[in-house]
Image (cartoon, rainbow, N blue to C red):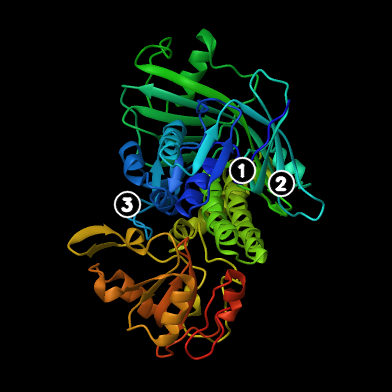
Amino acid sequence: MSTASRRPVVIIGAGPVGVTAALLLARHGVPSLVLERHRDVYPLPRAVVVDDEVRRILQSVGIHEEFAALARPARGLRLLDARHRVIAEFARSLHGRHGFPQTSMFDQPDLERLLRDALARRPESELWGGVEVVSVSQDTDGTAPVRVTFRRDGSDEDEHVWADAVLGCDGAGSLTRDAIGAVWEDLHFEESWRVIDVRTSRPVRTWEGVDQICCPTQPATFMRLGEDRYRWEFRLPADVHLDGPDGRERLRELVAPWVDVPSGVAGADDFEVIRQAQYTFRARLADRWRQGRVFLLGDAAHLTPPFIGQGLCAGLRDARNLTWKLARVLRQGADDRLLDTYERERKPHARYVIRLAVAIGWAMTGGQDRGAALRRAVVGAACRVPGVTTAVSRDLSPALTAGPLVPRRPGLIGRGLTGTFCPQPWVIVDGRRTRLDDVLGDSFALLTAVPPTPHMTAVTTALDAATIHVDDLDDDGTLAAWLARGRADAVLLRPDRVVMDIVPAGAGHFPDPTIWASLLHTARRTADARPVT
């Protein structure tokens, strides 16, 4: 006998992407049900790196302080040759434009527990563990509701839940991807690597950043995760074992450049292998991310090799980009075409990140052909060009491509701000030191350096957007300088803190809000009869 219910949103998968999506929806007042086949956090080693943009996302779901207590800022990435000589160094700041360290190391199970604890505090969301989704279906025209069929642990009885939208956060083997008929685009990288997490009290030689060993015969990655926690990744065949006396000796040889472990005691108490797993690193991109009200996020939509630490980051960016748009459609009647901008905005960035990771993988560690050494030499020479490593370090999240929510107008002064993120300095408001986003709130916001004009006020009223004058924020001058460089009197920020539009210096109004307002279904017109609906 089957049971049925209806929910605004069903999320398949309770990994970091799925739970973050649920938390973001809750912040926008949208209830959700998260279905997960595991009952507890998955314990094997996976993601260990997030950047400052993702730290800002964790701030938006209210766990950044708890995360800071378990995260470890890293100095960046070094590319080393087989003799551990530095080829290039990609430095990362301890204070990026989003207000956090540009690189933070952590243990994914710790992050997942923080996210689940936060979810348990939200009455808008439920998490059902021990539930396996067996099908996702909707009408042929892609209209809601979507039917999700699942089975509970130990039961062969089908149960159903209907949803206005379904988010497939169910990983590389996504059932949701199959359900919408999406297929992988192969971006031509596949290698088998062993991931090893270690706890040791022995002295470890580390520069407090990530080492990528660029060697055609034995590439490796090394990083420090915590006070006594370290991770090594080696390209090893699946049939190479690191257990038993012979395996421990092999492991001792592999880690010898970083830590001295006497022969025969690699399994001793002062060098403990916490866990190890074999992974196949792939580069793939789904050809579609949406059908009707069913969406793909995270590894269900894209797979990237881990060489630049952007796998999990990309999935959390997906959640941040989609959830405010979905909330606008479900709660405020915005046009369904707004949801088309999710793939349009996120897919080019995902492709960019994958290609960058593949380039590092192939040029620096991939392949053992005659061209491999030449590729490494060329990349090494390029990295020595002044400014190249700085640009690569900074540009992991370039401006969004032009679209309905990112208007680019030829010749318009300040056009360089649209599609970029507003920086997040510390500010002092009413004597209290806080981060900018905590002042802006969860919805749209107008950040202005001039008194709002009637037109600007009409727009903010229609969007229910906060109006923040930079003179009322006691910061270090970051915001005023940022607006001045962009030759803008004001910027309209989306809920994800991307600049949607600008008021050029001296203009007093947004050039043409109809470009984006028709998708948002704002309910009023501006004072000078420029339409906002």
What amino acid type should be assigned to the residue bearing mark 1?
A: Val
Q: Is mark 1 on a helix, strand or loop?
A: strand
- In front: 280, or 435? 435
Q: What element carries label 3?
A: loop
Name the residue beneath numbered marker 1. Answer: 10
Examine the rendered structure and indicate whether residue 6 appears above or below residue 426.
above
Sooner in the amino-acid sequence: mark 1 or mark 2: 1
Residue 146 disc label: 2
Image coords of residue 71 (percent x, y): 35, 39
Image coords of residue 29 (percent x, y): 48, 53
Q: Is residue 250 left or right of residue 256?
A: right
Cβ atoms at labels 1 and 2 below 8 Å apart:
yes
Is any atom of residue 304 visible in this view? no
Q: Report how far apart the C-alphas of labels 1 and 3 lie in the structure.
A: 37 Å
Please name which of the two marks, 2 or 3, marks the residue nearer to the observer: 2
Sooner in the amino-acid sequence: mark 2 or mark 3: 3
Q: Is mark 2 on a helix, strand or loop?
A: strand
Is any atom of residue 324 visible in this view? yes
Where, quadrant-wise, is the C terminus in this rendering? bottom right
Name the residue beneath numbered marker 3. Answer: 94
